[in-house]
Amino acid sequence: MISVFEKEVYEWNSRRKLWHFGGCVLMIAIYFLWQDLTLFGGRLNGLTVLLAFAWGETALCLAVDIICFYSTYYRQRKTSLFGFRHIMRAHEAKGFNASTYYLFGSAVLLTFCFFGFCREEILVMAILVLGIADPAAALVRWQFDKRARRNERAWGLLAFIAAGSLVICLVAWYYQSPLTWPQIFCIAAGTAMVETYTKNWVAFVRPVTRRVQNAIRHRMTEWTFIFWPDDNLTTQLAVAVLAVIFIR
């Protein structure tokens, strides 16, 4: 397990980022493609299909991660399947995969959208910002770190704001959203702060979360000690919360 207190290590894995981007695009594609299809004479609701898909995938990924936490055999099997060893980080072999956090965040947003607490454009906005702005920020941080330049995190934050603003602007234009440029910037900047400093904030509250975890310590709950809010989860939620504030 990787500790949230360890020094930040910047890396770039093209196949991992392509997988990351592809997963986000797949979510949007399923949502739109299934809207006009019919099954047994009835029209399918794209949101309902996507909601079932997201929660099903989340449950599957969570189950696989927990099983691999306890079993060395299945942990080795997971890393050898479908070339996952080329896109997984070391701590994900025994911990939660980034895809699990991403799917969980998407499933939560889809649930809010299903019950009317979140508009369609906010859902699309949140997923695409994660799929595009996050890799953009990672690439900039890695480039600056590779060249031994300072302020890698700050430059990555600026890259996230730029890419996030562009994505939000395009989604707002497509949906004819009333968002203004200052509002778009606030959403992108606020989300960039969450994406950049999630790990630090988790480390700050770790003493409290440890107390809660110790209260339920049991062999069957040991996997809870490796769970902490990943930026693949918090980024989507941050976009949605900030967008809801501006889009009434």
Image (tube, rainbow, N blue to C red):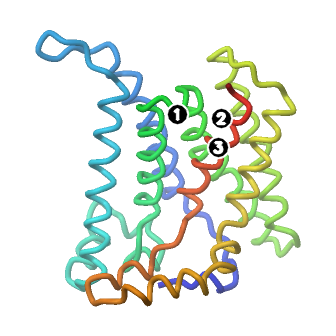
Quadrant of the image for the C terminus? top right
Q: Amino acid at mark 3?
A: Val
Question: Residue at the spot x=52%, y=26% of the render?
Answer: 120
Residue sitting nearer the eye, 216 or 180:
216
Marks 1/2: CA distance? 9 Å
Marks 1 and 2 in Cβ contact (< 8 Å): yes
Residue most extreme to the top: 41
Q: Amino acid at mark 2?
A: Val
Sequence-earlier tag: 1 or 2:
1
Q: Which residue is mark 3?
A: 241
Residue sitting nearer the eye, 60 or 139:
60
Q: Amino acid at mark 1?
A: Phe
Marks 3 and 2 in Cβ contact (< 8 Å): yes
Residue 10 pos. (x, y %): 67, 71
Image quadrant assignment for residue 246: top right
Question: Residue at the spot x=38%, y=77% of the render?
Answer: 93
Q: Which residue is mark 2?
A: 244
Residue 114 pos. (x, y %): 41, 31
